[in-house]
Amino acid sequence: MTRNDTETIQLRTTRVLPATPEEVFDAYTDAEKQKVWFSILDEEPGIVEIEVDLRVGGRQTAVWGPDADNLFRETQTFLEIDRPHRLLTESTGSTPDGMTMTTTIEVTFEEYEGGTLLTVVQSGFPAPEVRDFFVKEVWSGALDRIEAYLRRAGQPS
């Protein structure tokens, strides 16, 4: 399969989130906020390490998992940043068993009925089954966590 063939396997997912585009963009890109939402729905805390250099050419590195022997890693290189409207990154991720994958991720943040319509388009999957897993598990779980974080952050103290 050539590189052009893999770029055609993509996903598109959306979620309306209860915050402004600026608040959603910051929750998505700020390392300290990510450390909170990454584990916000976990019953037992795992390992979450995140560093973000939010500039074109900068990188976001995330390492997470239930324990030191089962860690996932992802490094995203920022290709375009248009705060608070759009991000374009190249993402290379690896699983605890050593499998790796590189994809391109575009995330947009649009005002929508008092909240934000977040849209993710990720391309470059090696197979439809991997894409489907990302739709059902990876992005669904991440967006559930971001939504829980934003709802908690939006509650009066």
Image (cartoon, rainbow, N blue to C red):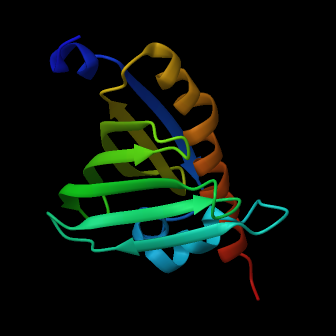
Quadrant of the rendering where the N terminus is positioned: top left
Above or below, comparing residue 127 to residue 149 in the picture: above
Relative depth, front residue between 154 and 88: 88
Above or below, comparing residue 45 to residue 157 in the picture: above
Above or below, comparing residue 127 to residue 152 in the picture: above
Q: Quadrant of residue 12?
A: top left
Look at 18% across and 21% down and name the residue there.
Answer: 3
Q: Look at the image and tell me whether residue 34 can be seen.
A: yes
Name the side, left or right, on which 141 lies relative to 81: right
How many marks do you count on the picture? 0
Q: Look at the image and tell me whether residue 150 can be seen.
A: no
Residue at the bottom extreme of this rendering = 157
Look at 74% across and 83% down and name the residue there.
Answer: 156
Name the side, left or right, on which 131 lies relative to 45: left
Look at 31% across and 38% down and name the residue there.
Answer: 102
Above or below, comparing residue 61 to residue 125 in the picture: below
Residue 151 position within the rendered picture, expressed as x and y whole percent measured from the top left: 69, 66
Look at 47% across and 46% down and name the residue there.
Answer: 117
